[in-house]
Image: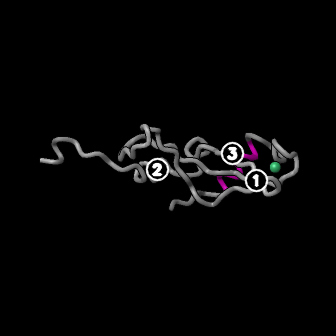
Amino acid sequence: MATHDENKMISYLTEKWGVIDCPMCRKGPLQIQDKVFQLNEYHQGNLVVGGPLVPVIPVTCINCGYTLLVNALISKSIDLAVASEAVPETKTQEQKA
Ligand SMILES: [Zn+2]
């Protein structure tokens, strides 16, 4: 499982959000997960290898459990080069021959 640059993530959220509490319970604190997760495109329940993925970092309220997802690429907390390695490549007809 991939990790991300936590310092970049904290800097990004501080720049964009400032210091905030949980938007639901207004308490918090919020905790940034140290792992990167991914959202897969829905294909009627079928797993499609090589489909589009969205890398996300969960941010969770320690008080109430509310969890929001921040795009890891937009927050620049993962490298684009590393992210593209995480996406399985689909072979073209030329590569299969
Ligand atoms: Zn909360």
Q: How many marks?
A: 3
Q: Which residue is mark 3?
A: 68
Find disc 2 in the rendering and name its residue.
83
Where in the figure is residue 25, as x and y percent of width and height?
Answer: 85, 46
Instruction: Name the N-terminal-most of marks 2 and 3.
Output: 3
Around disc 3, counting alpha carbons within 10 Å, would you say few (fewer than 14), some (14 to 19), or many (20 or more)?
Answer: some
Is residue 9 a member of the stretch shown in magenta?
Answer: yes
Q: Quadrant of residue 44?
A: top left
Q: Nearer the viewer, residue 83 or 63?
A: 63
Q: Cβ(mark 1) to ligand 1 < 8 Å?
A: yes
Name the mark nearer the viewer: 2 or 3: 3
Residue numbers of the magenta segment: 7-15
Q: Which residue is mark 1?
A: 65
Image x and y of residue 17, in percent: 77, 41
Of 73 and 48, nearer the camera is 48
Say if disc 3 is inside 8 Å of ligand 1. no
Q: Check if mark 1's residue and mark 3's residue have beta carbons within 8 Å.
A: no
